[in-house]
Amino acid sequence: MKNEDRSNARLDAFRRLLKCAEAFETVIGRSLGEYGLTTSQFNTLGVLMEHGPLSQRDIAEHLDKTGGNVTLVVDNLVKRGLVERTRDTVDRRVIYVSLTEKGRITFNKVVPIYHARVVETLKVWDEKQISGLLEMLDPLVPSDSPAPVRNGAYVAN
């Protein structure tokens, strides 16, 4: 295969990965929308469930999002009573975000539905194909990433 053909194949693979990610986002977004959550809100609840109270900056790092994006997401979650903000008692500049009981209940209710939708979507592949896919993706997105959110999708450990 010529270099130009290899480049075109890589570009085609990249485009198809993006289309897959967009299709997943749509399918998952619809499922979460039934519970009044956006993907970003769900992922934020997941990070807080996994790590406990965090600063907005830490949430942004876990989600690989900007601080401004996380501020808007957290504002909306606060309005719904799913999270709350508290100031650090030592450094008043630091504000922590934590799940409320309503946030925990909501997350625990939605996560099995989310997982079932993901599993259903991936039923087009058998276990051997899934293993092969994971091996191919590992150099791009290592499976040992410390964050429970990888590329915008909550992954329970």
Image: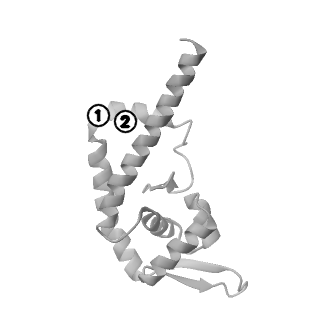
> Relative to the observer, which residue lies in front, 30 or 96?
30
Q: Is residue 13 above or below residue 48?
A: above
Kindly identify the amino acid type of the residue bearing the numbered disc 1: Asp
Instruction: Find numbered disc 1 in the image and state the secondary structure of the residue it sits on.
Output: loop
Which residue lies at the image location 36% right of the left edge and 59% below the top edge?
A: 29
Residue 151 location in percent, x, y?
A: 51, 51
- At which x and y percent is residue 13? 47, 31
Can you identify the residue that label 1 sits on?
126
Residue named by callout 2: 130
* Residue ID at (58%, 18%): 4
Whether residue 140 is situated above or below residue 36 in the rendered picture: above
Amino acid type at image mark 2: Ile
Figure quadrant of residue 35: bottom left
Contact? badges 1 and 2 (CB < 8 Å): yes
SS type, badge 2: helix
Count every numbered label the image shows and give the total: 2
Q: Residues within 10 Å of mark 2 (few under 14, many from 20)?
A: some
Quadrant of the rendered structure where residue 110 is?
bottom left
In three-dimensional space, the C-alpha distance between marks 1 and 2, rounded to whole angstroms, equals 6 Å
Q: Residue at x 73, y 83 (%)?
A: 91
In this view, 140 is above or below 44: above
Residue 99 visible somewhere in the drawing: no
